[in-house]
Amino acid sequence: MIRYIKQNVDKFFPNGSIGRRLFVVGLTAFCSLWCTALILLMGTYQAPRYIHKKLQTSDSFVWKLMKTFLSVPSPTAFLFLNYNFFLANKSRPRLSSGVSGYVDGSSGYYSHDFDMGDGESIETQQRGKVLELLLPKLATLPEGAKVCEIGTGNGDVPAYLSEKFPEIFFEGVDFSVNVATEKHLGNVGRRLSFKEGYGLDLLQAQSLSGDVLFASSTFVLFTPKEIDKYFELLSRSFNTVILNELILGDYQTHVEGEPTSIHMDENMWFHEYILYAKKYNFALDQYTLNHYNHPTSLRPDIKLFIGSFTQEGGF
Ligand SMILES: C[S@@+](CC[C@H](N)C(=O)[O-])C[C@H]1O[C@@H](n2cnc3c(N)ncnc32)[C@H](O)[C@@H]1O
């Protein structure tokens, strides 16, 4: 190929001729111009934006190929995104970069009619799996006990519980509780309430406390430093913690040793809940770790960790 090009250049612009010199100068100027443009393009923040826009709008074959590569979740793209998420969050003490979609309410969990293809009633939904350990615990609480859910979404679970246990105070916490309050307005009264805010700040400010704290698919979003801090603060404010959290993949839950957290996929972490709880004086009451047949995900490796922890000797 190169020999063919050289032969033709030699033919049209013989060595030593003026034409040959003009050709070389022209070619150099042309290449420099393109290189400069490319460097400018890639060297500024516009480059990723340009590429992202092209990926969404261009119909050319090359961009389509690139689109396919990026959207058929290729292992490389997954690795890249996951590793970048891990780097950005591994030392972050609060609010993982993955929760921004929840902070502004665009996640779907706040929706009035919570519908993630997830079962018709609370009992059959993923969030309802927490009831396995929660209901027997609530049945032992005295009148006037206080129970709180962090990451309440549209507030359906505390609303459901407050009907079952009218003598207990329930509080649902989330970044936004507008929908929860609106939806359960008729019930919001002395014994059911919603509080807006970031759980860790509310705990730190001592505006969350009670007998039982529970959560579903929420602790899985905390960063390693954040979960450590949560358990430290929970140990000062709640007697019992009941969790219902996703585990993706083949992670082992240990009951002895130092707690660790490993990033799984997207914005989710595998935390050794039992060990974090132990570190802050919570004893493990019971837990299950079973395969979960998720109604919408095709992943075959979804498990639910459902565990209950109680303060040794109270707080
Ligand atoms: C994956 S959704 C789960 C919602 C609901 N518990 C369920 O299982 O359907 C996680 C929820 O937790 C909330 N959340 C996450 N971190 C939180 C935090 N630190 N403080 C308060 N809310 C939080 C999010 O806004 C979101 O509504």
Image (spheres, rainbow, N blue to C red):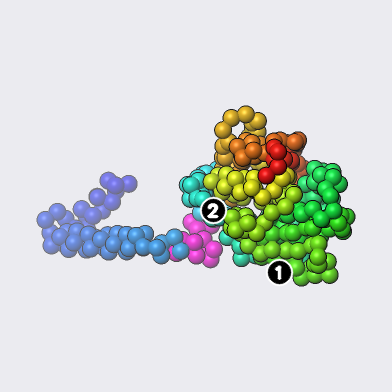
- Residue 124 in the image: state x and y as whole percent: 83, 50
Q: Mainly helix, strand or loop, the magenta region?
A: helix
The local crowd at label 2, few if under 14, some if 14 to 19, many if 20 or more residues have their Cα within 10 Å, is some
Q: How far apart are labels 1 and 2 at the CA level?
A: 23 Å
Residues in magenta?
Answer: 50-65
Determine which residue is flagged by label 2: 94
The local crowd at label 1, few if under 14, some if 14 to 19, many if 20 or more residues have their Cα within 10 Å, is some
Q: Does the residue labelled 2 lie within 8 Å of ligand 1?
A: no
Helix, strand or loop under label 2: loop
- Residue 244 in the image: state x and y as whole percent: 73, 45
Question: Which amino acid is tagged 2?
Answer: Arg
From this viewpoint, is residue 305 visible? no
- Residue 300 in the image: state x and y as whole percent: 71, 40
Q: Farthest residue toward the left?
A: 16
- Residue 16 in the image: state x and y as whole percent: 11, 56
Q: Nearer the viewer, residue 310 or 95?
A: 310
Question: Which amino acid is tagged 1?
Answer: Asn
- Quadrant for the C terminus, please: top right
Q: Residue 178 carries which label?
A: 1
